[in-house]
Image (cartoon, rainbow, N blue to C red):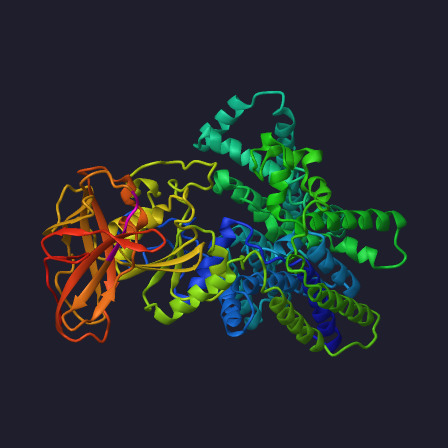
Amino acid sequence: MNLQRAGLLVALCTLVAAVYLLTYSGRIESGDTLSLFDAASSLVHYGDSLFDQSASVNFPPARADDRLYPLAGADVEPLHGWLAAGLIALAERLPGIGLVHAAWLLNVLVSAAAVGTLYIYARALGYHAPAAVLAALALGLATAVWPYSKTFFREPLALWLILLAALLLDRWRAHGYRSLPLLVGSLLALAAAYLSKEAVVFALPALALVVMPGWERPPRALALSFKLGMALILLALAVLIALTLISGSVSLTRLYDYIAWILRRRTTEVVVAVTALHSYLLSIGGSVWGTSPVVLLALPGMWRLYRRGQYRYIAVAVMLVLAFAAGYAVLRGVHWFGGLSWPPRFLLPVLPFLILAALPVFDRLTQRPFPRWLAAGAGGLIAYSVWVQLSGVTLPWGAYTAALPPESGGLSEWGGGLNVVPYLRWVVIPPLWGQMPLDFAWVRVNNLAWPLLAGGLAVVSLWQLIRLLRGQRGLPPVVLPLALVAVVYIGLRGIYDDALYLPPERDALFQAVALLEQEAAPDDVLLLSSDTYQPFFLNVSAAPRVISLPDQPGEQPSPEQPPLIRAENPDALLTKETIPLLFNLAGQRDRLWLLADSGPWLAWSVRPVERFLSMHYYPLRVIEFAPTVRLIEYDTTDAPNPYAFRGPEYPADLVYGGELRLAGFSLPKGTIYAPGETLPLSLYWVAQQPPERDYTVAWFVAGADGRITQGQDTLPGGGFQPTSRWLPGAPVWDNRALRLPVDWPPGEYQLWVRVYYWDGEARLLPVQGDGVDEMTGLLPVTIYIQ
């Protein structure tokens, strides 16, 4: 490749990347991309691909699991995560850059690389530079490649690698199958494509056509086979069109039943497959040509290729489209659409091959003289296609489904949105532009430096491209990539303060992170009581390992909105997946950390996870950084089961204020401890009579030499068993823990318990019974520190 071609390639890729940066969002668009990022982040931080911060949507198996981290994980198609891990690791080493923000650059770079690869491909096929540049720009800015450059989906990477494999195979064939580097390179690209998306197998027949000899001057038998194959394909499309047209007025149930019987499939599977094929190939709002109209230029392009007897890339494009459409329609079943995505997500890899088939049209457009009707028609189609892509990059994709009528059910794959003009995405979205902020990162943070820098880089790249196309000298090729790196670095630092990831409680959260980094052990975990702060921890580097729990059915979202479940037993308030996960985590470590996003100040908040942990384990301390940022440390020693009808290990008879009787207590770790060890204690209370108010329990470990350490003062049961609700005679377990000072000498120590209420000052309740010292109850046990 000479210097001018290298300069053209660099300018082209930089131009497209700069445009992508202008519309860059860094928004996690779906549960799929959340999971992909989480696996890549786990790879960087822990060397595995487990779903920890996305555990709220990727539930681990609901069974006993003795692994240190009993989580589900990603075990297929890892290349995307490996590449993203490099960006995440780099972001960790650069101050002021968010991890999600960095990872979401991956498809910007990959999509720009695909544009450059198509340019090289076009040149390798003998097309001159202007045609190759125009075709490459059409791929990058007039197809669904642009909307997907904003995402973290794997399809752009699969697109690039399949295209690269095809290019290398084409060159290997052109070199007479004698170039070992080209063969090895094509096999490596194909292997990489498989590691990015296993659906690359759908591309194998088309790639076989790329490398097959004899297409340059096809013998009559091959030409006849090609024409027959095209005729059969057109017939199949005609049948599909006919089925679509008559399905609204005639019941096709018997026909589908018959097809299902022949194929030995269920009728519903046949219906889903037909629906998917219609959407992929025919629908005006969801097909490969509907959402990327510029690929319609492949039709006149194929005609010109056919007239020249150049059948190869007609067959390649058609084979690729049919293989991907049929493969996904049959194998994906009801998930054929791809969730919250820009359709058709799964057919994205076929787009560059349709552009390759359109190369004769682009070639004609860049040669003078050219017919005005061709320029007007192709120019209008390209402009319309760019308009469609602008609708895909300007707002979050969820805005479209939210704007659909109620009958859509909020589904992206709703038939009306795929087939009815008023509900097409590029019809519904533009009127929303004045009602919603644009989904660009620089808009969210109001940072004008980003568009100025990226826009300036795009202008300079375009200037460089035009000069080189005219045969004039331009900037050295290295200048634009260096400028791109600088723009990306400055831009990412400028959007770190992104409200998507840094909530108003950011200062309190950073304080919690700082404390955890100082105190957490390597195998500790931080549980998020809900996914409220999940985005924050996704975008910042934090220790220990963060596991996000799902919203629990027992939680009350607001004072007006009741919980899905009401129950006294905290076990009934959690999802069936959460309970075994908490048990499994607690069974493999001495403590758990919980970050709660609510607290006692919200009287209506149920806090199911906190209730569960306070009943089964021992609250050690609560650190409140803000009312909605509470860090709770739990000792994971198993507490007595309050529903097991078992009494305390040690009897006691202490009555506080004539109302509360401490009837006993349990020490699950026994009576012998080392300095610095955690001492858990379960108090067994019984109300003598209905308590008048809510009382607070304080407890201490005291030595004969005057040494005293105090546990946290709380209402019984971790705050969830207020005494004003106690029924006379009903026992109440109250789990507590404290950490013994590390500098305490060996000796014998006592346990003290006090009860008080707050009335402008702490008012202690008098104590009656054995082992009473003024207002303090002394438990009948001796603690030994050795």
* Rendered position, 429 above or below 133: above
**What residue sits 40% from the left and 36% below the top?**
564
Residue 695 magenta = yes
Q: Position of residue 440 (x, y in %)?
A: 66, 56
Residue 145 visible, this angle: yes
Q: Quadrant of the N terminus?
A: bottom right
Q: Position of residue 191 (x, y in %)?
A: 49, 62
Q: Position of residue 192 (x, y in %)?
A: 51, 62
Q: Position of residue 560 (x, y in %)?
A: 48, 36
For the residue pair 401 and 555, the one nearer the viewer reads as: 555
**What residue sits 77% from the left and 70% below the top?**
460
Q: Over which residues does the magenta segment extend?
A: 693-698
Q: Quadrant of the C terminus?
A: bottom left
Residue 536 magenta = no
* Rendered position, 248 above or below 111: above
For the residue pair 763 and 423, the one nearer the viewer reads as: 763
State the image quarter where residue 686 is shown. Answer: top left
Give the left or right position of residue 535, taking residue 782 as reference. right
